[in-house]
Amino acid sequence: MPDLRRQIFESGKTVSRKAASREASRTNSHASSKQTSRQSSRAASRQPSDDEDAGYLSDDTAMSIGSLDDENPEQDNVDWPQELSDRVQELLDRKRSSVQGREEALAAFCRLTKYHYAEEELRASTNDLLSAFVRSIRTDSSIRETTLALRAVELLAITTSDDKIFENAEPILTRTIRDSSSNAVKAAAIQCLGTCTIFGGAGEDGILDQMTFLLDVIASDGQSIEASDDPTSVTAALQVWGFLATEIDDFEGESEEAIQIFIDQLDSGDSGVQIASGENIALLYEKSYTPQEDDDDDESDESEDSDEHATAGNGPKLIKRYNAYHNTPELERQLQSLASVHSKRISKRDKKSLHSNFASILTTVENPRRGPRYNMAIDQDTNRHYGSTLTVKIGRHGIMSIDRWWKWTRLTSLRRIMQGGFAEHYFQGNRSVLDNLPIMLRSAGSGQRTVDRESAKKAAKMRNSRRWTAQHSDDEE
């Protein structure tokens, strides 16, 4: 794997003054004092809300997702395949379209593919649709059309898993990230690039290249893409970087450099940037521990609090393989400060979010065997934070245990892509979703079970069959 810091700081790319100063000071001491906090006065910009194009950035925190039982407005739409076919034809017939017409067609495409797993319906037209979406992105006729087209590319990638999407979409996405005049479009393009990288056939080398590109965006505070100090773009880059990192098994050589960049972002004036940075730090600490193997020593390399914290959920014992960062005590002090921050300049909502998230992040940095936590409490004797393992309700079918940060990172990323349609795709057998998040579910009144692709598809077919029968029974009456 390439040296991330060397690629960023020797590539001739733009870096922030803070980053350049930090790199110079690191030659004198690894444990240099924390730099003066940068407070951004600009609030994260938001695209005007629209049912289909809002939400390309996630405001979700580690404590905010208790249920994925979202209302599905498409539940009784038995004619959705025909409606989708009509919309696809509208999108492909660009010569007769207007900006407003394309916006409405794109919004309908996003709605239908969000709430229905349409792999069979889209398979034959994947290449043509991608070309149509790319044209909308390239022409940039309106912010709404561009962001909707970016959403449509994401949904196409996660629905079809076509391994040619990344190579065909990456050039225009990278150009949009660098050249768009809209920070909202830049952020949406960053998220789209991440989705295409994971589900569009990039491969490990492609994933590593995009992680380096995103780390450049983060380290330069957005300057490398002409979005200086824009928290929307930086947050998107942080979220996507974490999602891509879950696909990389061995990150030992790059952990130190990446964590240092994320630590610098803990000084941001935007809570979204801070939380996304903290979550990436927790993920990298978690990666420094792997399951015990047959040839490992029986004795642990460090004392363990209890058997509960020595395993990944109910999985194997976890063993430390390397130091994720050279100065964990200083990092813990910084995380503790964010977990108890009381500045009057911070809103009550942001303050609550910082407290709950960084308390959970701190528990993992203190002991990487611990995953995300909620209902955090403080042990008054040791001043350590403890809490329950995070669980999430999915539809009416079961409970998902999020006992590792890689699961949390993937869940939040998939939820952002699918929005209210996550549960539908999960239980209708979308292979991209199931392969990316193969998690045990516990149904009410039953033991644990694994939802595999075939059983999910069978359940979806039975549900669709019942809807078809009910519709035709009504017609006969």
Image (spheres, helix red, strand yellow):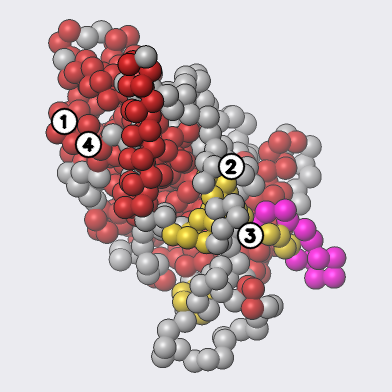
Tell whether position 344 is magenta: no
Q: Secondary structure at mark 4?
A: helix
Pair 3/2: label in front: 2
Q: Earlier in the sequence, mark 3 or mark 2?
A: 2
Q: x and y percent of residue 161 in the render?
A: 25, 45
| 35 w.r.t. 395: above or below | below
* Quadrant in the picture for residue 196: top left
Q: Kindly report the distance in space between the C-alpha atoms of the residues bearing marks 2 and 1.
A: 34 Å
The residue tagged 1 is 125
The residue tagged 4 is 120
Q: x and y percent of residue 115 in the render?
A: 40, 31
Pair 4/2: label in front: 4
Q: Earlier in the sequence, mark 1 or mark 3?
A: 1
Q: Residues within 10 Å of mark 1 (few under 14, many from 20)?
A: few
Residue at 24% x, 56% y is 203
Query: For residue 389, which numbered disc appears in the image?
Result: 3
128 vs 330, left or right, is left
Residue at 19% x, 47% y is 163
| 311 w.r.t. 360: above or below | below
Query: Which amino acid type is marked by label 3?
Result: Thr
415 vs 435, left or right, is right
262 vs 161, left or right, is right
Pair 4/1: label in front: 4
Q: Earlier in the sequence, mark 2 or mark 1?
A: 2
Q: Kindly report the distance in space between the C-alpha atoms of the residues bearing marks 1 and 3.
A: 43 Å
Residue at 55% x, 53% y is 443
Query: Which amino acid type is marked by label 2?
Result: Ser
Nearer-the-camera pick, 308 or 83? 83
